[in-house]
Amino acid sequence: MSIFYLFSLIFGFFGLFYGLYENSKIKKIHILFGKTQKNDFFTKNYQKHRSQEILEKSDTLLKNIRLYDENITFKILSAFMVFLLTYVCNIIFSLHISQALLGMIGIIAILTSFLAPSYLQKIIIDSRIQKISRDIPMFVDLLAICVQSGMNIEGAIKFLEGSVGQINKGFAPFLSRIVLKSEISGLEVAIDDLQKELPSTEISMMCATLKQSLRYGSGIYETLMNLSMEIRELELLKTEEAIGKLSAKMSIPLILFFMFPVIIIIAAPGVMKVLKGF
């Protein structure tokens, strides 16, 4: 039972220190927001938070992970339940788990419950943004078709707002925000915000093209079609680069698991004959 009380003590201290740390972090953010709104670090974190909020409108998994991450009580209870379940299974099934191992399981459960949600959110957000970037050429093609049919850029975006979810449901909330902001602040401001909320090369290229057309009134259809081709070529270059890196990464396993066994198989008969001679 000593390990149980020791774990409870460590758990309590860890929860207390983590709560104090989160509280101090929130206070610092409020100070930054009140005094230095143009701080780059705060601006980047704010934009990341806004991107996550928008993505959560079409992703319940991301929303649930964020709610779990914000609730310290859930984290404490989940870590405690993992430890308690391990402890009960050890008693019922006589697993003979040592006290040191139980303590390690408890500490790992604490660290996982407090640190894993943040990493999961980052991984999910990055994957959603990458998926949106891959689907941007198709959206640009549809936008070009709408413009060619006689619509202006703003009208084409409004028209595609309802159907873009079939291409990429994660991009639909961002497009809805563009429509709403364009009615209030103008389309160029809405496009600027989109470029900040979705930090990727493909999005930046599309936003720059749309802003150029709005400012200078250049022909947009040919520009959009060329943009779509450029983005697809960029994706192809990224794929080729990944394949090139993969061949370099595969060389180490090939040397370890193929070349050395082949050398052993070839050399083994001769070595065995030499050893028999002695």
Image: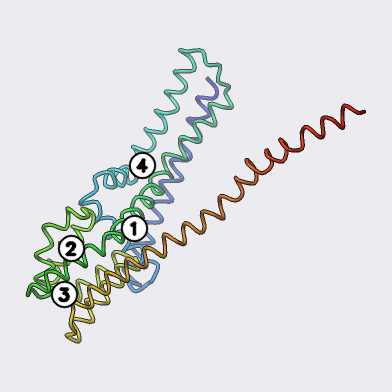
Name the residue located 34 percent from the left edge and 37 percent from the top edge.
Answer: 74
Name the residue located 16 percent from the left edge and 58 percent from the top edge.
Answer: 164
Q: Looking at the picture, which amino acid does disc 2 mark?
A: Leu
Precedes in sequence: disc 3 or disc 1: 1
Q: Looking at the picture, which amino acid does disc 4 mark?
A: Ile
Residue at numbered disc 2? 175
Crowding near pointer 4: few (<14 within 10 Å), some, many (20+)? some
Name the residue located 27 percent from the left edge and 59 percent from the top edge.
Answer: 135
Name which quarter of the figure residue 51 lies in. bottom left
**Dots 3, 2 in contact, CB < 8 A:** no
Q: Is residue 217 above or below residue 46?
A: below
**Dots 2, 1 in contact, CB < 8 A:** no
Real-space CA distance between mark 4 and mark 2, rounded to the nearest whole angstrom? 34 Å
Q: Is residue 57 left or right of residue 263?
A: left
Real-space CA distance between mark 2 and mark 1, rounded to the nearest whole angstrom? 16 Å
Q: Looking at the picture, which amino acid does disc 1 mark?
A: Gln
Residue at numbered disc 3? 187
Residue at numbered disc 4? 72
Per the image, label 3 sits on a secondary structure element best described as helix
Per the image, label 2 sits on a secondary structure element best described as helix
- For discs 4 and 3, the disc positioned in front in the rendered view: 3
Precedes in sequence: disc 2 or disc 1: 1
**Dots 4, 3 in contact, CB < 8 A:** no
Real-space CA distance between mark 4 and mark 3, rounded to the nearest whole angstrom? 41 Å
